[in-house]
């Protein structure tokens, strides 16, 4: 069984013990917070929403620059502001992005002076969420670190025991081979379980998909956006 187990362990253990790439979502949240804060500053000087988005492109963080560039391209191509913002939320594919986009949609509809204050408040909310996610990821990293340490110690002990032919002799029998596979399989299953438990579960989005043909025309969709954001612009 070692002929099968050793190659599988060589390939599988690095994958099971690797740290999930959760930094990307946190970096995008940080970029969204910075972009929202900068956008509120541009709006504060009295320019229109569409122009502010275009001007703000130059200071957009790299983590969300492709999505903002696409948003600017759609506005330049004379998409309606609401349709472009809904597509922007879909590109971000994040519940916090939906919250920012919904606030901008309300601002585009009402054209009130309160959008700047709303965006400033949203920036503070997103900054708090970034801190919370970093704290959660720090807690999730602890069991992964413990599992890596235990695995390395276990491999070292197994390597030393393999030199003791008397100790490993029972595992050379058919029953011993089956027992060895079951034990190693149970350990691998525990690592898979731990990996699944520490994966980030995204918050469900609330804005409808912009590909829905009725997303811009349906009165109910307008009510959904108004209900989705607890703040009012105007």
Image: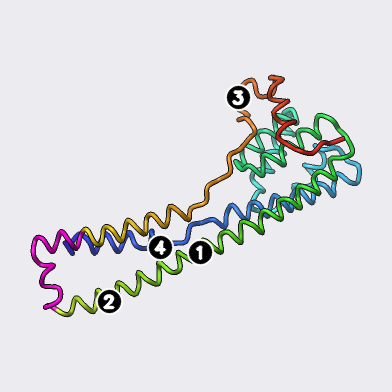
Asked which secondary structure carries label 4, the reply is helix
Q: Which of marks 2 and 4 is nearer the N terminus?
A: 4
Residue 207 picture location, percent across and down = 65, 33
With respect to residue 144, does 83 lie above or below?
Answer: above
The answer to which image quadrant residue 26 occupies is bottom right
Q: Which of marks 2 and 1 is nearer the N terminus?
A: 1
> Is 156 covered by the magenta stretch?
no
With respect to residue 112, does 1 lie above or below?
Answer: below
For the record, the magenta segment spans 165-181
Q: Distance between the residues labelled 1 and 4?
A: 11 Å
Q: Earlier in the sequence, mark 3 or mark 4?
A: 4
Instruction: Kindly report which numbered mark, 3 or 1, lies closer to the viewer in this rendering.
Output: 1
> Is 180 covered by the magenta stretch?
yes
Location of mark 2 (residue)? 157
Instruction: Kindly report which numbered mark, 2 or 3, lies closer to the viewer in this rendering.
Output: 2
Identify which residue is drawn at 72% across, 42% down.
Answer: 100
Q: In which quarter of the image is the C terminus?
A: top right
Assess disc 2: are there few (<14), some (14-19) or many (≥20) residues with their C-alpha within 10 Å of its C-alpha. few
Instruction: Kindly report which numbered mark, 3 or 4, lies closer to the viewer in this rendering.
Output: 4
Q: How far apart are marks 3 and 4 (CA)?
A: 41 Å
Kindly identify which numbered label has been placed on residue 214.
none
Q: Distance between the residues labelled 2 and 3?
A: 58 Å
Residue 65 picture location, percent across and down = 67, 48
Identify which residue is drawn at 81% across, 35% down.
Answer: 107
Location of mark 1 (residue)? 141
Kindly identify which numbered label has been placed on residue 212.
3
Kindly identify which numbered label has been placed on residue 17.
4
Assess disc 3: are there few (<14), some (14-19) or many (≥20) residues with their C-alpha within 10 Å of its C-alpha. few
């Amino acid at each position: 069984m070692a002929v099968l187990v050793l190659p599988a362990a060589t390939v599988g253990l690095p994958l099971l013990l690797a740290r999930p790439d959760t930094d990307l979502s946190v970096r995008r949240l940080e970029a969204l917070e910075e972009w929202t804060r900068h956008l509120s500053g541009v709006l504060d000087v009295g320019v229109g929403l569409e122009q502010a988005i275009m001007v703000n492109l130059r200071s957009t963080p790299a983590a969300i620059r492709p999505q903002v560039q696409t948003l600017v391209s759609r506005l330049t191509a004379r998409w309606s502001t609401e349709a472009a913002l809904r597509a922007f939320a879909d590109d971000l594919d994040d519940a916090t992005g939906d919250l920012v986009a919904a606030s901008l949609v309300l601002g585009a509809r009402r054209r009130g002076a309160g959008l700047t204050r709303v965006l400033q408040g949203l920036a503070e909310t997103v900054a708090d969420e970034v801190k919370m996610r970093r704290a959660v990821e720090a807690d999730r990293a602890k069991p992964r670190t413990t599992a890596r340490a235990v695995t390395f110690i276990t491999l070292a002990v197994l390597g030393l025991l393999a030199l003791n032919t008397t100790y490993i002799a029972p595992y050379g029998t058919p029953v011993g081979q089956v027992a060895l596979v079951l034990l190693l399989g149970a350990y691998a299953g525990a690592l898979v379980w731990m990996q699944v438990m520490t994966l980030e579960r995204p918050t469900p989005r609330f804005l409808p998909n912009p590909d829905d043909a009725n997303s811009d025309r349906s009165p109910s969709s307008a009510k959904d956006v108004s209900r989705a954001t607890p703040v009012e612009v105007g």
